[in-house]
Image: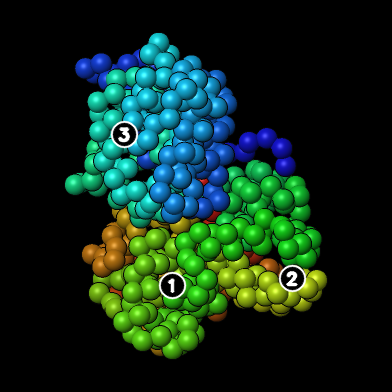
Amino acid sequence: MDGFIGRRAELATLTRMLRRAETGGRAGRPGRAVLMRGRRRVGKSRLAEEFIGRGGVPSLFFTASAQPALRADLALFIEAAASSSLPGAELFREQSPQTWDAALHLLATVLPADRPSVVVIDEMPYLIANDPGFEGTLQKVFDRELSKRPVLLLCIGSDLAMMEALNEYGRPFYQRATEMVIPPLSPAEVAEMLALPAVEAFDAYLVTGGLPLVLDEWPEGAGVFDYLQDTVTDPTSALLVSGERALAAEFPPGAMARQVLTAIGSGERTFSLIGRAAGGLPQASLNRALHLLTGKRMVDALVPLSTQPSKETRYLVADPHLRFWLSFLGPYLVEIERGRGDLVLERIRKSWTAWRGRAIEPVIREALFRMPDGALPKDTGAVGAYWTRTNHPEIDIVAADRAPVANAITAVGSIKWLENRPFDPRDLARLYVHRSQLPGASENTPVLAVSRSGSTVDGVTVVSPEQLLSAWQ
């Protein structure tokens, strides 16, 4: 795959920010700062590089390391600045700042005053972890010097919780930066990139999670098993490597949170079953691990959506690619490394239909919520699901005015994501029964069906894969 696909909205936003820095600001402070966050491997650094390349402005791109050694990052910053395209970069070759304060002050002197420039600090959470004082130092220099230059400062990080916290009240950078979230490529962008019809684009999205590096290996027009046939036999493929690198960056081997994440990825959803699958963890330890995982936005804690509060929490791996990797690849890397990727592929084939049926549900709920003129009533403010401890009933789609406890239920629905299996009268009858058991719903509550293969009944709104895909277009 050649070229740069998608990210039109993100590139446009960055271009506007750079233009504002170029045209100046109030009180002679044209400088702008952006806190850019997104999951690992979604292409944040690649986006920044593409933006700089298209802008054609002087720039500095610095990537922090995870090295805990004192001043290691400072040395890397000086090296990056000295080799940058900033007009005064040679000053970093002539001087050797001994502190971050001195280095950032020197940066301010080499930034051009008559034209815009871009400074990128990538993997900023590593910097803050290694030097807790860096955040305050950057804020001080930004206020006193950098903001007076026509510079766009991009601070990038993959630790979602930490990057989000940087702009909170009480933190040094509070209200000094614009927050920018970089999501994975959407199902619609996957369809465009791979030239796939809607149903196959959703399959590709469930496997890749919309990660550009993984999608780059996917041949245009290839179905899911055409792609997997080659990649699961290659230990160096991005599909295999991305999951392991994402986990290694967050957790050391043997970390309790990683055990819990693996248990959730294997399909366990409830507190007790997760603890059992993670090796019989004590309740307090499991609570700490789940708190860490949800704090890092790696796991979603879901509750049933209805007009009554519920404690029946279920846990879900937030990233679709990591969900696939933990289910089918991570536990079997040894087989792949010894040349038996065929065993992994056969295991995926046997479980694919059932796994896909469950994995597509949160994607469909997000699509329904995004659809501007979709099947949901206009007063819908949340889309979720409903279940009880016994799973009787278990409702795939619940639309309501708000979450987690609704005032009103606006619609209920069913998901049927099987090939050659349309939504039929039995499905509709079951949906009516489940609607009658949902707190807050009535016989007047609208019903809908999301079906991969259409419907054979009247009286229900049917949403197709093509309509779902349009939610991102």
**428, 318: nearer the viewer:** 318
Q: Which mark is residue 336?
A: 2
Q: Amino acid at mark 2?
A: Ile
**287, 404: nearer the viewer:** 287
Q: Residue at x 42, y 35 (%)?
A: 154
Residue 51, horizontal then vertical, whole percent: 53, 30
Alpha carbon of mark 3 to alpha carbon of mark 1: how far? 36 Å
Asked where in the image residue 303 lies, by quadrant, the reply is bottom left
- The residue that disc 3 covers is 101
**397, 297: nearer the viewer:** 297
Give whichever of discs 2 and 3 has the lower sequence position.
Answer: 3
Tags 2 and 1 touching, CB below 8 Å: no
Q: For the residues carrying marks 2 and 3, which lies nearer the camera in this image?
A: 3
Q: Residue at x 28, y 37 (%)?
A: 137
Q: What coloring was used for the rendering? A: rainbow
- The residue that disc 1 covers is 257
198 horizontally vs 107: left or right = right
Q: On screen, 140 above or below 472?
A: above
Q: Amino acid at mark 3?
A: Asp
Q: Residue at x 49, y 48 (%)?
A: 65
